[in-house]
Amino acid sequence: MIDRSYLKALAASLGVSLDDRALERFDRYARLLCDWNEKINLTAITDPQEICVKHFADSLSVLAKVEIPQDAKLIDVGTGAGFPGLALKIARPDLRVTLLDSTKKKLMVLDDISQKLELDVELLHKRAEEAGQSRPYREQYDIATARAVANLAVLSEYCLPFVKVGGRFLAMKSAKTQEELAGAKKAIGQLGGRVEKVHTLQLETAGERTILELKKQSPTPAPYPRPSAKIARFPLG
Protein backbone atom coordinates (compact mmCIF):
# COMPACT_ATOMS: atom_id res chain seq x y z
CA MET A 1 0.00 0.00 0.00
CA ILE A 2 2.63 2.54 1.01
CA ASP A 3 5.78 3.31 -0.96
CA ARG A 4 8.35 1.73 1.35
CA SER A 5 11.26 3.51 -0.31
CA TYR A 6 9.53 6.83 0.26
CA LEU A 7 8.95 6.09 3.94
CA LYS A 8 12.53 4.89 4.37
CA ALA A 9 13.85 8.14 2.83
CA LEU A 10 11.43 10.22 4.88
CA ALA A 11 12.61 8.54 8.09
CA ALA A 12 16.25 8.90 7.05
CA SER A 13 15.72 12.63 6.58
CA LEU A 14 14.80 12.68 10.28
CA GLY A 15 17.87 10.64 11.18
CA VAL A 16 15.82 7.48 11.80
CA SER A 17 16.89 4.22 10.19
CA LEU A 18 14.17 1.70 9.29
CA ASP A 19 15.12 -1.87 8.38
CA ASP A 20 13.14 -4.11 6.03
CA ARG A 21 11.16 -5.68 8.88
CA ALA A 22 10.08 -2.26 10.15
CA LEU A 23 9.09 -1.14 6.64
CA GLU A 24 7.07 -4.32 6.18
CA ARG A 25 5.27 -3.66 9.46
CA PHE A 26 4.54 -0.05 8.56
CA ASP A 27 3.11 -1.18 5.23
CA ARG A 28 0.84 -3.70 6.91
CA TYR A 29 -0.10 -1.18 9.61
CA ALA A 30 -1.30 1.23 6.90
CA ARG A 31 -3.35 -1.51 5.22
CA LEU A 32 -4.95 -2.66 8.47
CA LEU A 33 -5.63 0.92 9.54
CA CYS A 34 -7.49 1.64 6.30
CA ASP A 35 -9.41 -1.65 6.50
CA TRP A 36 -10.53 -0.93 10.06
CA ASN A 37 -11.28 2.69 9.21
CA GLU A 38 -14.13 1.51 6.98
CA LYS A 39 -15.83 0.07 10.10
CA ILE A 40 -14.69 2.45 12.85
CA ASN A 41 -13.78 6.11 12.45
CA LEU A 42 -10.07 6.17 13.30
CA THR A 43 -8.50 8.72 10.98
CA ALA A 44 -9.38 11.18 8.24
CA ILE A 45 -5.99 10.48 6.66
CA THR A 46 -6.16 7.52 4.28
CA ASP A 47 -3.98 8.55 1.33
CA PRO A 48 -0.84 6.35 1.46
CA GLN A 49 1.60 9.24 1.10
CA GLU A 50 -0.23 11.29 3.73
CA ILE A 51 -0.20 8.30 6.11
CA CYS A 52 3.58 8.14 5.66
CA VAL A 53 4.03 11.83 6.45
CA LYS A 54 1.26 12.80 8.86
CA HIS A 55 1.11 9.59 10.89
CA PHE A 56 4.35 7.63 10.51
CA ALA A 57 6.99 10.35 10.04
CA ASP A 58 5.23 12.61 12.54
CA SER A 59 5.44 9.81 15.12
CA LEU A 60 9.07 9.06 14.27
CA SER A 61 10.02 12.71 14.74
CA VAL A 62 10.19 11.91 18.46
CA LEU A 63 13.20 9.67 17.79
CA ALA A 64 14.76 12.40 15.66
CA LYS A 65 14.70 14.95 18.48
CA VAL A 66 14.80 13.05 21.77
CA GLU A 67 17.24 10.37 22.87
CA ILE A 68 15.12 7.55 24.28
CA PRO A 69 17.14 4.97 26.27
CA GLN A 70 17.28 1.30 25.28
CA ASP A 71 14.41 -0.74 26.78
CA ALA A 72 12.69 2.42 28.03
CA LYS A 73 9.18 2.08 29.41
CA LEU A 74 6.83 4.35 27.42
CA ILE A 75 3.14 5.18 27.76
CA ASP A 76 1.21 6.81 24.91
CA VAL A 77 -1.68 8.74 26.46
CA GLY A 78 -4.80 8.99 24.30
CA THR A 79 -3.18 6.81 21.67
CA GLY A 80 -6.17 6.75 19.29
CA ALA A 81 -5.08 4.79 16.22
CA GLY A 82 -1.66 4.12 17.79
CA PHE A 83 0.23 7.35 17.13
CA PRO A 84 2.92 7.83 18.14
CA GLY A 85 3.12 4.77 20.44
CA LEU A 86 2.67 1.84 18.06
CA ALA A 87 4.73 3.54 15.34
CA LEU A 88 7.57 4.01 17.86
CA LYS A 89 7.35 0.32 18.79
CA ILE A 90 7.77 -0.65 15.13
CA ALA A 91 10.88 1.52 14.78
CA ARG A 92 12.21 0.60 18.23
CA PRO A 93 11.07 -2.93 19.19
CA ASP A 94 13.14 -2.68 22.39
CA LEU A 95 10.72 -0.14 23.85
CA ARG A 96 8.20 -1.41 26.42
CA VAL A 97 5.08 0.34 25.20
CA THR A 98 1.70 0.89 26.86
CA LEU A 99 -1.10 2.26 24.68
CA LEU A 100 -3.73 4.04 26.78
CA ASP A 101 -7.13 5.11 25.51
CA SER A 102 -10.56 5.57 27.04
CA THR A 103 -12.31 4.26 23.91
CA LYS A 104 -12.58 0.48 23.96
CA LYS A 105 -13.20 0.16 20.20
CA LYS A 106 -9.88 1.84 19.40
CA LEU A 107 -8.02 -0.54 21.70
CA MET A 108 -9.81 -3.47 20.07
CA VAL A 109 -8.42 -2.30 16.73
CA LEU A 110 -4.93 -1.84 18.18
CA ASP A 111 -5.10 -5.32 19.70
CA ASP A 112 -5.82 -6.79 16.28
CA ILE A 113 -3.12 -4.71 14.57
CA SER A 114 -0.42 -5.37 17.16
CA GLN A 115 -1.12 -9.12 17.06
CA LYS A 116 -0.94 -9.21 13.26
CA LEU A 117 2.29 -7.19 13.34
CA GLU A 118 3.66 -9.53 16.04
CA LEU A 119 4.34 -6.65 18.42
CA ASP A 120 4.12 -7.07 22.18
CA VAL A 121 2.40 -4.00 23.64
CA GLU A 122 0.22 -3.41 26.69
CA LEU A 123 -3.26 -2.08 25.97
CA LEU A 124 -4.80 -0.04 28.77
CA HIS A 125 -8.51 0.82 28.68
CA LYS A 126 -8.79 3.63 31.23
CA ARG A 127 -9.29 7.35 31.44
CA ALA A 128 -5.93 9.06 31.83
CA GLU A 129 -6.90 10.77 35.10
CA GLU A 130 -7.93 7.42 36.62
CA ALA A 131 -4.82 5.54 35.47
CA GLY A 132 -2.62 8.40 36.67
CA GLN A 133 -3.93 7.87 40.20
CA SER A 134 -3.48 4.08 40.02
CA ARG A 135 -0.37 2.62 41.66
CA PRO A 136 0.57 0.23 38.79
CA TYR A 137 0.86 3.20 36.40
CA ARG A 138 1.62 6.29 38.47
CA GLU A 139 5.25 7.41 38.08
CA GLN A 140 6.20 4.11 36.43
CA TYR A 141 7.34 5.31 32.99
CA ASP A 142 10.56 6.71 31.55
CA ILE A 143 8.61 8.45 28.77
CA ALA A 144 5.04 9.61 28.30
CA THR A 145 3.89 10.79 24.89
CA ALA A 146 0.75 12.54 23.71
CA ARG A 147 -0.19 13.81 20.28
CA ALA A 148 -3.18 15.92 21.22
CA VAL A 149 -4.78 19.30 20.68
CA ALA A 150 -5.46 19.90 24.39
CA ASN A 151 -3.91 22.93 26.05
CA LEU A 152 -0.45 22.15 27.43
CA ALA A 153 -1.40 22.82 31.07
CA VAL A 154 -4.30 20.38 30.76
CA LEU A 155 -2.22 17.83 28.86
CA SER A 156 0.55 18.03 31.46
CA GLU A 157 -1.87 17.22 34.27
CA TYR A 158 -3.00 14.13 32.42
CA CYS A 159 0.50 12.96 31.45
CA LEU A 160 3.15 14.03 33.97
CA PRO A 161 1.74 11.81 36.77
CA PHE A 162 2.74 8.75 34.71
CA VAL A 163 6.39 9.80 34.48
CA LYS A 164 8.97 8.71 37.04
CA VAL A 165 11.35 11.32 38.46
CA GLY A 166 14.10 11.84 35.89
CA GLY A 167 11.82 10.78 33.03
CA ARG A 168 10.23 12.91 30.33
CA PHE A 169 6.86 13.89 28.95
CA LEU A 170 6.90 14.61 25.22
CA ALA A 171 3.97 16.74 24.05
CA MET A 172 3.63 16.71 20.27
CA LYS A 173 2.12 19.84 18.78
CA SER A 174 1.47 20.91 15.21
CA ALA A 175 1.62 24.67 15.62
CA LYS A 176 3.81 27.30 17.24
CA THR A 177 3.40 26.96 20.97
CA GLN A 178 5.41 29.73 22.67
CA GLU A 179 2.34 31.52 24.03
CA GLU A 180 0.79 28.24 25.20
CA LEU A 181 4.06 27.21 26.80
CA ALA A 182 4.42 30.50 28.67
CA GLY A 183 0.93 30.06 30.11
CA ALA A 184 1.61 26.48 31.20
CA LYS A 185 5.00 26.82 32.94
CA LYS A 186 3.48 27.39 36.39
CA ALA A 187 1.19 24.36 36.01
CA ILE A 188 4.09 22.20 34.84
CA GLY A 189 6.05 23.21 37.93
CA GLN A 190 3.10 22.37 40.21
CA LEU A 191 3.03 18.88 38.68
CA GLY A 192 6.74 18.26 39.34
CA GLY A 193 8.02 19.06 35.87
CA ARG A 194 10.04 21.68 34.08
CA VAL A 195 10.51 22.58 30.44
CA GLU A 196 13.73 20.96 29.26
CA LYS A 197 13.71 21.72 25.52
CA VAL A 198 11.46 22.90 22.73
CA HIS A 199 12.17 21.02 19.51
CA THR A 200 10.90 22.25 16.16
CA LEU A 201 11.11 20.61 12.76
CA GLN A 202 9.61 20.91 9.31
CA LEU A 203 7.69 17.83 8.25
CA GLU A 204 7.54 17.33 4.49
CA THR A 205 4.23 18.64 3.06
CA ALA A 206 2.80 18.94 6.59
CA GLY A 207 4.46 22.08 7.92
CA GLU A 208 6.03 22.83 11.27
CA ARG A 209 5.94 20.44 14.18
CA THR A 210 6.90 21.13 17.79
CA ILE A 211 7.88 18.60 20.45
CA LEU A 212 7.84 19.99 23.97
CA GLU A 213 10.21 18.01 26.17
CA LEU A 214 9.29 18.27 29.85
CA LYS A 215 11.54 16.70 32.48
CA LYS A 216 10.08 15.24 35.67
CA GLN A 217 12.17 16.65 38.49
CA SER A 218 10.05 15.84 41.55
CA PRO A 219 7.07 13.59 42.36
CA THR A 220 3.65 14.83 41.28
CA PRO A 221 1.63 15.89 44.36
CA ALA A 222 -1.06 13.36 45.35
CA PRO A 223 -4.12 15.42 44.31
CA TYR A 224 -3.07 15.35 40.64
CA PRO A 225 -4.44 14.39 38.22
CA ARG A 226 -7.82 15.66 39.36
CA PRO A 227 -11.14 14.42 37.92
CA SER A 228 -11.55 15.48 34.28
CA ALA A 229 -14.40 17.91 35.04
CA LYS A 230 -12.14 19.82 37.44
CA ILE A 231 -9.24 19.79 35.00
CA ALA A 232 -11.50 21.27 32.32
CA ARG A 233 -13.18 23.87 34.54
CA PHE A 234 -10.19 24.89 36.63
CA PRO A 235 -6.98 24.37 34.62
CA LEU A 236 -3.76 24.83 36.55
CA GLY A 237 -1.63 27.89 36.04
Image (spheres, helix red, strand yellow):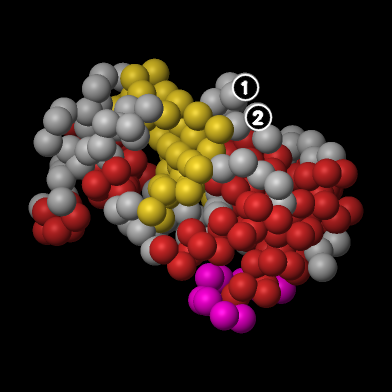
Q: Provide the residue designation for mark 2.
A: 94
Figure quadrant of residue 82: bottom right
Which labelled disc corresponds to residue 145? none
Magenta residues span: 38-47
Residue 80: say if magenta: no
Residue 100 shown left or right of residue 50 in the figure:
left
Q: Front-most of 102 and 1?
A: 102
Q: Position of residue 50 (x, y in %)?
A: 69, 66
Residue type for callout 2: Asp
Q: Front-most of 148 and 88?
A: 88
The image quadrant where one finds the N terminus is bottom right
Residue 83 shown left or right of residue 205 in the figure:
left
The image quadrant where one finds the C terminus is top left
Figure quadrant of residue 43: bottom right
Q: Is residue 50 above or below residue 8?
A: below
For image coordinates 24% across by 47% down, the residue present is 130
Residue type for callout 1: Gln
Q: Provide the residue designation for mark 1.
A: 70
Q: Front-most of 189 and 199?
A: 189
Q: CA distance from mark 1 to mark 2?
A: 6 Å
Q: Is residue 148 above or below residue 167?
A: below
Q: Position of residue 104 (x, y in %)?
A: 41, 63
Please identify the dominant SS of the magenta region: loop
Asked if disc 1 and disc 2 are in contact, CB closer than 8 Å, the reply is yes
